[in-house]
Image (cartoon, rainbow, N blue to C red):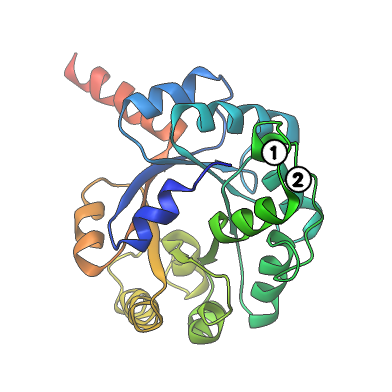
Amino acid sequence: MKDNMVRATLGQGRPVFGTMIQELRSPAVPIILANAGFDFVFLDMEHGTFNIETMADLVKVIRLTGMTPLVRVPDGQYHVIAPVLDAGAQGIMAPRVETEDQVEHVVSCAKYPPLGKRGCSVAKGHNEYQNADIHEFTDHSNRETLIITQIERREAVDTIDKLISVSGVDVALIGPNDLALSLGVPMDFAHTELKAAIGKVLQCCQRRGVATGRLAGVAAVLPVGFRRGLLLLTYSLGFVLLTSAGRRGGEAC
C-alpha cells in the first residue's frame, strides 16, 4: 500500500510543486516531469481529452516515478470518482463545488465505509494489483486519499467556511480564471474583488487548518502565493509549457 507523499508533505506545512496535463498522452511525459522535479501531476479529465483507459495508463507511470498522481474529475459523481481512484490516483479534485451537500457527496464517493460509500476491489491499480487485508487496505486508503475542492465560483467563496468544514476535505484549490469570470471581472487578476475573494478563502482555510493551493499560469505567481500561505502550487499546463518554451526559442532567433 502506497503512502501519499503530497498529503504527508502538506500535513507538515510544506509546499508541493506540480503541473497539470490535458493533451499529452505519452508515458514519457510523467517521467520527464519527474526529472524536472515535480512532486505531483494532475491529469485533467474536465477539460482534457483523457478517457478512463488513458488516465489509468498515465497514473501507473506517475506512480512508478514516485510522484503523486492526482486527477481533476469532470464532475463530483460516484461513477467518475471511484474508477479514477481504483486506477491508482491518490487524490481527486472536484471542480465547480458550491454547496456543502456537493462536498459531502464527493467525500462519500471517495471514501470506504464507514466514512463513505465507495465500493471496494483491492487488487487494482491503487494497490499495484496485489491483495491485502481488506480492513488494513480500506483504513489506509481512507487516510491517504487526498480530497481537493476547487474554488472557482462566487457561491463557493460565499460558503467557503461550510465547504472546508466537511470532514475529509484536505485542500481548497483556487481556480483564478473561472473565479474571476464568476465575479464578473474576467482576466482581471489585479481586481480588488478577486483579491478579496482569494483573501477570504485563504483566511478561512488557515483558520480551519485546511491546505490551500492555486492554478498559476505564470511562474512569478508561485513564490507570492507561497508567502501568502498557498501550499499546493500547480504551475501551468503540459502543452502550455511546450508552447512557452518554443516561443522563447523562436524569439531568440
Which residue shows up at 38% across the image and 66% down it? 212
The mark total stands at 2
135 or 141, which lies in front? 135
Q: In which quarter of the view is residue 238 placed? A: top left
Q: Residue furthest top?
A: 253
**Where is residue 215 drawn, in percent x and y?**
40, 54
**Where is residue 134 drawn, in percent x and y?**
74, 51
In the image, 220: left or right of 108? left
**Dot label at residue 87:** 1
Q: Amino acid at mark 1?
A: Ala
Characterize the local packing of mark 1: few (<14), some (14-19) or many (20 or more) Cα atoms within 10 angstroms: many
Q: Are marks 1 and 2 in contact (CB under 8 Å)?
A: yes
What residue does disc 2 label?
83
Which residue shows up at 64% across the image and 49% down it? 46
SS under mark 1: helix
158 or 204, which lies in front? 204
Whether residue 252 is visible: yes
